[in-house]
Amino acid sequence: MEKINRVSQADSLRCSGKACCFFKAMKNRDPNLKRSLLCRFFDDMPHVDDPLHVLVMSGLWSLAMSNPDDPTLPSLPSFFTCMANLIHKALNDLHWLHKDQNIYIPYYAAHIIGSYTINSPRFVAKAADVVVVPPLVELLKGRLSWVEQRVAVRALGHLASFDSTFEAVASYEEEVVKVSMRVVFDESVKTKQKEKYQSELLSRGLGDEGMEEQRTEEWTSQLQCWSIQLLNCFASKQRSIDVIVSDGRFLTCLCNMWGSPAGIGLLRILCQSKAGRKALSRHKDVVLSLCNLSRSSDDFQYMGIDCLLLLLRDKNTRDSVLEGSVSCLVDLVELGELGRRRDVGGAIARALLVDYKDGLYCDKEVERALGVVWDLKVGRRREARMGKEDLEKRRGFVSSKRRQGNEQFWGGDINGAMGAYSEALELCPLRLWKERLVLYSNRAQCHLLLREADEAISDATRALSLSRPANSHAKSLWRRSQAYDAKGLAKESLLDCLMFINVFFGSDEKRRCDKVPYYAIRMICKQMSYVGLFSSASSAIDGESDDIESIGKDGKQLNMVAFKSGVASFLSL
């Protein structure tokens, strides 16, 4: 509002155009007169050329962003009609579009529609009634550029998320779904030459190339996420499932997306339909990605587990998914609470053992893994009858074997140490979860040194499942991060490393200083260079590489000042 007032004070004295009527109307203190003047202005705006209209749209954009629930403007009968007509005009009158600064107007118009329809069902219904959907669909199809496409898909997603206006968007279902899918795996946006107005919008008029590149990365990520959110609106109503699951490239892109629940959220919705489960079970790379997510420090780990359980509980997809997922899920059967979910491991065990007694497994590896789960289930029952004296004897034996393993490890006998840890695990009572956590973590370190990455991931995951809360054992996080790095899984390695730093600082009051281990910094820098979403932060860190090298040669810790400046943008995501 202050911005609009400043503009009006500067321009009302020297202009007589229609745009000045808007600024004067906004300053009017009589609500009835103000409403009448604004209605007249929005009725006339699409039919009048005024170089100051871009200032009006900029002011409206600021108001919509700062207070999307304010009814002053969206309650006007001609407001949304005006926005829709301006987009129509931009699409059909290229001469007008490239005159003055009108090129900004369709972007602002779509953004304003999206902002005012984000919360209020009343505004959403009013927008749908005046037919804002057709021009937004045209922008979504890329009639202008990806910049307008981004704000169009945002607005359509808001309209489709309300039951009262879903059908208005669904009338263009085939076009909307296909275009949204194509947007998700379209990588050409980042390489396209930007027009001047796009650069101005991206850099907020400052001409900062660094900011422009960073915001290009952010906006393309938002374009993907909002496109998936729009698809979610259809999938959640069991619409266009067959179309969504028909493209293997699209499903692969969903698996590779992270930093938001959009991709995995759509996969989970697809897993809730018979057609979706059938299609996903045929894609081994999708199942593998779900397994990697389930054994990671991702905030959406539980979604990956949910998807696998939905696939396993379906008799039509169980056999095709079990072989690829059993080795992953076995590592999670002792998982307790995960966020608000309790006894996650119990749910996994029940899904795995649903037909175990039938013994109809052709794959020996599957049979062996399910046997491990069964032994854990039976072992708990046996332990319930175990006396206190027997428990203490086993505790002493486990402690002795662990010390033996430690001595062999530091003596260079890695295989011997691994054998000692395995013996201790076989006899360690399940209720001694702290001892078992350490044994699994130590054995994971042995596997790492023997370059057995898969086994290291398995043991580290079992240790992290036993930790309280889940995924809070620093050494296991670091070991699994290294194992994922050895397998070339940059995202999983990076997440474990970030979680390791979080646990590292939170575990000891003395460590709560502005320092981070140098080896963790190096791992983060390495993995960020492989993850597109963080490339700008990685570049910022690379600029300090000389200082990092000079400090890191003696293995000391690195001051986090430079580090924070590079990664602050993604730590807050």
Image (spheres, rainbow, N blue to C red):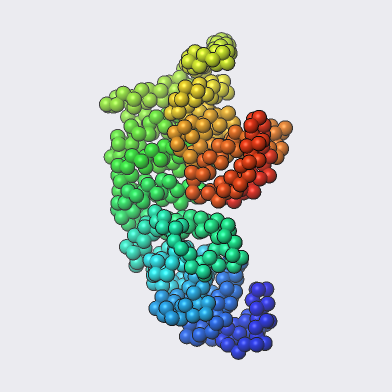
Q: In the image, residue 456 lies at what x, y percent?
A: 47, 27
The residue lying toward the viewer, choosing from 544 and 405, is 544
Where's residue 290, x and y in %? Answer: 41, 40
Instruction: Identify which residue is drawn at 49% across, 74% down.
Output: 103
Location of residue 215 in the rendering, given as x and y in whole percent from the top left corner: 54, 58
The quadrant in which residue 511 appears is top right
Q: Quadrant of residue 188?
A: bottom left
Q: Can residue 473 be spotted in the picture?
A: no
Q: Is residue 275 left or right of residue 440?
A: left
Give the answer, above or below, for where 567 lies relative to 384: below
Q: Is residue 398 above or below residue 493?
A: above
Q: Residue at x 64, y 34 (%)?
A: 552
Q: How many marks?
A: 0
* Picture residue at 56% right of the left edge, 46% below the top: 538
Residue 502, placed above or below residue 62: above
Residue 51 image-quadrant placement: bottom right
- Decide if residue 478 is in sight here: yes
Between 56 and 310, the residue placed more toward the observer is 56
Counting from the top left corner in percent of width and height, residue 421 is at: 51, 16
Residue in view at x 47 percent, y 77 percent: 98
Q: Is residue 242 left or right of residue 346?
A: left
Quadrant of the frame with the N terminus: bottom right
